[in-house]
Image (tube, coloured by chain):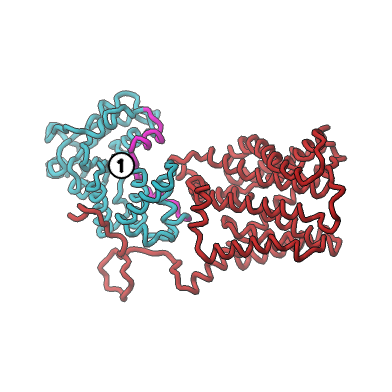
Chain colours: A red, B cyan
Amino acid sequence: MSALTKTFKSMSKAKLAAVVVAIAVIAVFPLVFTNPTVTEIAIFALMFMATSSAWNGFAGSSGYFSLGHAIFFGVGAYAFTIIANDFKMAPTSALFFLMPVAGVFAMVAAVGVGAVALRTKRHTFVVITIGIFFIFQLLGFNLNVTGGASGLQVPTPSNWNAATFNNPFYYAAAILLGFTVLLYWIIKRSAFGLQLLSIRDDEERARGLGVPVWRVKLSAFVVSAFPVGMAGALFAYLIGQIYPQTVFNPLFDLSWALMTLVGGIGTIVGPLLGGVVLESIQQYLNLYLSNVDIYLIIYGVVFLAVMFWMPRGIVPTVVGAVKRRRGTPTGPTSIATSDDKQPAKPDQTAGLIVTAKGATE
Amino acid sequence: MTITDPILSLDGVCAGYGGGDVLQGVSFEVNRGGITCIVGPNGAGKSTLLAAVTGLIKPRVGSIKFNGETISGLSPRAVLSKGVVLVPQNHSLFPDMTVRENVELGAYTIKDRQVVKDRRDKIEEMFPVVRSKAKDKAGSLSGGQQRLVEFARCLMLDPSLVILDEPSMGLDPKTLHVVFQTMRAMNADGRSILLVEQNAKAGLKASSHGVVLENGRVRLLGTGREVLEHPEIATLYLGGSVEAAGGVR
């Protein structure tokens, strides 16, 4: 709790105000927009904002791009469904409390996947995660416990009001998003977050500093699986029927990577922005135009446009532009090292003088 | 030369990287609260010596004691936790992390964030560059500034012994002066310094004690001034060897 308090205390008033407004907007959204189609789009947008944040929390912080996080989505979906079915749990709001359990199953899977994949370096890691992902998808198709290609039925609430049916799912997705953002906000400001950043910057240098590189990477990988597993459980409960190809879906990883890169990798806000924009577009196209594939073309165009004009992503580019307008120095700095006659410049040796006693000869 | 209160003692240390011993029975002591400078030509074994002290390699024979406790054979992390920190020869900052993040990374083993903050505040007073450039990327700093941030980072663990490996490397004379001034400030702040320096004149001049290594053996020991003024030093650095090891030893 103290970490949470410190986190809020460390925020500027403007940031705090933005967070309060965002929470308020998310809280009242389904009360204002009551159309179930709109709320369903919002559920998916929130879900993908959360999963993109989790993906970014690992990939953006460590520099290791995972194309296997959909494994944890699938494991979460299957764990939720199998437990709910086997224990004959009633499809009520209480079933949402099974989501963290599904998240734990995803974490367990992440320990195994990470223990193998994280033995490799960045580029190889990408390939290994793709390979392991397809192993899981194959298992989904071939195991009895997953129902094979026929998939599994998920208990569906039958007595909920049709007009507000989506609302519990919406708020569950909103809580998942809030939890994920808060988790990575705290991690980013922790010693663990610093170690992750040092690995992203220079893994060997981090090792030289004594950072337990493999342990830190594996921990971050496993932590990131938790929200993704919960999202998988929520997805299963919402859809009511899961198949290997729908929950072990390779396009999920591409979407999370794209949403993060478009918004700004390594930032808190980037994946949220990318997630809300791209997922909303995709769901809109699916629901209103009945075209399930056109979003891939739009994703490609958006990706190329952002990489061409804003290669660091939208958020870092905009923040950089605002800093430049305010006159914050962004270029390299150096100390004056010679007595050459130069045009008058600010004193660049400022800050080099040590103030402890005994410093002078 | 007798050191009454050594913080670090090496006794007959033989160590290498598997292809034979680079260090061949090195023995000397680092006095508490002083600055001890190790000089020697290329290949003398200076870097190997630091690797042995910081736990990167295990001595085959001999012992290394820190505060009277044997540390030879301990892992680098264990040596670090005893209060021995190394500022390596090459720039070791993380260029895409901010200066503040780099400095705080030095205390990643400390769980109490308040302790970290207090130390950072103290260090920012000592190193104004850490505060003034706190939000700048470390990679945007000059070589001299980066060296000072490395010093600042190493102090986050509140070490008793700071090992500086070639701090003057790649620095111009003016910046070098500031870096050595900083080293003296760290020493005045109560830390013992073990300095390895190619710039023998500058290193020995700034040090209370000097050690000359040659071919993996200690050839001269004395105060910084005694070693600096020893007639054989120039010969050694011109590629010769010390004929009479007696000297100031």
Local packing at callout 1 (Cα closer than 10 Å; few below 14, some 14-19, many 20+) is many
The residue that disc 1 covers is: B163
Height in image: B224 above or below A43? above
Query: From this viewpoint, is residue A262 visible?
Result: no
Which residue sits furthest top? B61
Q: Nearer the viewer, residue B21 or A275?
A: A275
In-front residue for pair A122/B119: B119
The total number of labels drawn is 1
Q: Where residue B49 appears, x then y in whole percent? A: 31, 35
Residue A359, image x, y percentages = 22, 54
Residue B151 visible within the image: yes
Which of the two residues, A270 or B76, is positioned nearer the viewer here?
A270
Which chain does the numbered disc 1 sit on? Answer: B
Give whichever of B150, B124 is nearer the camera. B124
Percent across and percent down for residue B212 are 21, 38
Q: Residue at x 17, y 35 (%)?
A: B221
Residue A3 percent coordinates (x, y): 51, 49
Element assignment for label 1: strand
- Magenta stretch: includes residue B82: yes
User: Residue B128's image quarter?
Assistant: bottom left
User: Which residue is painted at 25% across and 68% down in the image?
Assistant: A339
Residue type beneath disc 1 = Ile
Question: Is A172 left, or right, of A309 in this rendering?
Answer: right
* Residue located 42% across and 50% down the image: B104
Q: Which quarter of the figure is the C terminus of chain A placed in?
A: bottom left
Q: Residue at x 13, y 44 (%)?
A: B225
**Residue sitting farthest toward the bottom:** A343
Rendering quarter of residue B23: top left
Asked if B113 appears above or below B1 in the picture, the reply is below
Q: Is residue B113 magenta?
A: no
Magenta segment range?
A: B73-96
